[in-house]
Image (spheres, helix red, strand yellow):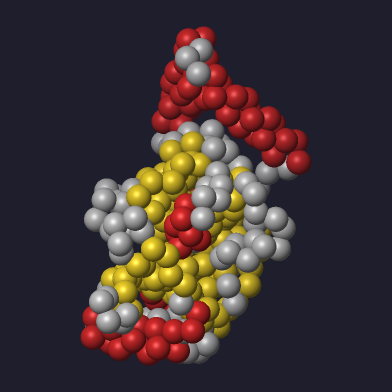
Amino acid sequence: MHKYLRAIGFSRYQNRIEVRTLLDRIQERYQSAMQTVSLNNGDTLWETRAELGLGMGIVMSGYMDEAGKAIRESYFPYFLSPHRSSDVYCSIQRHVEAESYSGLLDDVRVGISLIFRLINEGEYLRRKQKLRSTEVKEVHLTAFSVDGKILLPLHKDARQRAVAKVAEQRRGKLIEAARNGDEKAMESLTNKDMEMYTSLSRRMQKEDIYSIVDSSFMPEGIECNLYSVIGDIQEISLKRNLLTGEQVWDLLISANEIPLHVSINQLDLQGDPQIGRRFKGTIWLQGEAIWADQEEGELQ
């Protein structure tokens, strides 16, 4: 049972039997929307995207047996975003245990490699089959959370924000240079990190950690696409699950200057979300790849 189903409004489904019954019903309802792709080994895979709310739903996939029956193997909730999160080089890799895929972004704004579950993996496979480009032009990141908190904003005037933005841009350039083998950039980054550590150690003796850390994007646990984030809330909307009637928050946040939409059940968010405040929580990261030859408005 997928842990993050409740993040799109399925909090009442508590065990595998209930979830299986739900998926069977949805699969039958969206049978006509099923798309297939044939692999070189003779397998025929299928995928369907069931929209159960505005821009959110469940992706189900599996294979066709000898009788032509669709056998479901996997499913996961999805959430779509109209906002570009990153346009740096993105590689797509297949998972070892199944015909599913993850993307990897080396964005200097974060300082680490971001790994996310690819939402439109069916389109990726169909493009490979038709020999169309699988080069990624940009990625629209989204995330799910089942435990989030609202933090008050840090007070910064226009000058402080401008100085912080310039410093972040300089750091990004240094990271990029260090990745390319620039020893001076490596040394400069090391010195700046030591200075930052010393400054933070002093401040933490008198200040709360959340008055020091404005934004963060850090790996959480041992799974590669789980992250702990703190980000400024830029947009807010409340969406409704068409099957259950449950409401979920759609929060557009900026974490380390990377915009992403976070979906969280209204029951799982502590505090009152408002633009300008901050979101803190553990997220499961996914993303939609926009292809290099994809024209504006083209359906996936």
Residue farthest to the right, as pictured: 158
Q: Where is residue 111 drawn, in percent x and y?
A: 48, 34
- Left or right, residue 253 beside residue 1: right
Q: Nearer the viewer, residue 299 or 289?
A: 299
- The vertical placement of 67 against 268, above or below, is below
Q: Tell me the quarter of the image containing the N terminus.
A: bottom left
Q: Position of residue 150 (x, y in %)?
A: 52, 62
Image coordinates for residue 45, horizontal then vertical, percent? 36, 67
Q: Is residue 255 visible?
A: no
Q: Residue at x 45, y 89 (%)?
A: 29
Q: Quadrant of residue 12?
A: bottom left
Residue 4 in the image, given as x and y percentages of width and height:
38, 69
Residue at x 58% of width, y 72% of height: 55
Q: Residue at x 58, y 64 (%)?
A: 300
Q: Nearer the viewer, residue 276 or 31?
A: 31
Q: Quadrant of residue 205?
A: top left
Do we see residue 130 in this rendering? yes
- Residue at the far top: name it: 184
When the figure is inspected, residue 252 is found, relative to residue 166, above or below; the finding is: below
